[in-house]
Amino acid sequence: MTLEIIGFPRSNFVRTVRMAAREKGIAYDYIEALPHSDEVKAIHPLGQIPVMRHDGLELAESQAIARYLDTAFDGPKLFPEDPKKGAIINQWVSMTATSIDQLLIRKYTVQYLFNKDPDGNVIRDEIDRSVKRFPKIFGLLNSAVEDGFFGSNSFSMADCFLMPMIASARNFPEAKDYLEENKVLASYFDRLSERPCFAETAS
Ligand SMILES: N[C@@H](CCC(=O)N[C@@H](CS)C(=O)NCC(=O)O)C(=O)O
């Protein structure tokens, strides 16, 4: 059975697993569905995206899906098999999927998009709190991509998690400014933006 990836294109985590599938050369059917839709709730008990189906397996959670794609299919290994290299990529994937997602997406991007007063003005409390943490987070990301990729000198699953988050956050002014100031990160983002896995999963 063909792999099915289910979710909404604007979701950073959906883009992550689509990028991973593209990098590995896995053909898949993409089924557009919103969080909390019946299709998604049938697989993820909390209604979150992405979810997937393959060969009798139904699976939720981006990290679980990422690992399944990497182990069940041929193609380049996105979690390196060398234990130490693999551990470093796991470290960055975990930090990105938790702390960095919270800061750049949930407490920043999502606030700009959806947290508005009745007149349609953005409510800035959470955004302003997040921006105070930007120097530290952008600084650490700037250092982490010094070898050309995220925590590595070759493309890995950590890049699949980070790139969609930067892409979403940079649509808003403070993240755009911090990205421009952190020149190693900015050039990493520009270079990886050209990669087919990223360019082809924008929508
Ligand atoms: N831990 C989940 C988080 C996924 C997640 O937050 N997805 C967002 C879209 S990017 C979502 O479904 N949001 C709706 C919700 O949390 O209710 C994963 O890694 O897959």
Image (cartoon, helix red, strand yellow):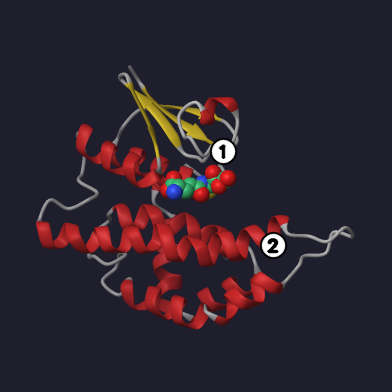
Left/right of residue 107 with respect to residue 94 in the rendered view:
right
Question: Residue 25 in the image: x percent, y percent?
Answer: 29, 35
Residue at image point 58% right, 26% down: 38
Disc 1 residue type (three-letter): Phe
Image disc number at residue 8: 1
Give the farthest residue toward the right. 119
Disc 2 residue type (three-letter): Tyr
The residue carrying pointer 2 sits among few (fewer than 14), some (14 to 19) or many (20 or more) residues within 10 Å by Cα, namely many
Which quadrant: the C terminus?
top right
SS of the residue under disc 1: loop
Which quadrant: the N terminus?
top left
Question: Residue 65 in the image: x percent, y percent?
Answer: 34, 39
Q: Nearer the viewer, residue 172 or 200?
A: 172
Q: Is mark 1 within 8 Å of ligand 1?
A: yes
SS of the residue under disc 2: helix
Residue at image point 43% right, 54% down: 194
Considering only vertical position in the picture, is 172 above or below 75?
below
Does residue 130 appear in this view? yes
Question: Residue 159 in the image: x percent, y percent?
Answer: 35, 57
For disc 2, the marked residue is 112
Q: Quadrant of residue 163?
A: bottom left
Q: Quadrant of residue 139?
A: bottom left
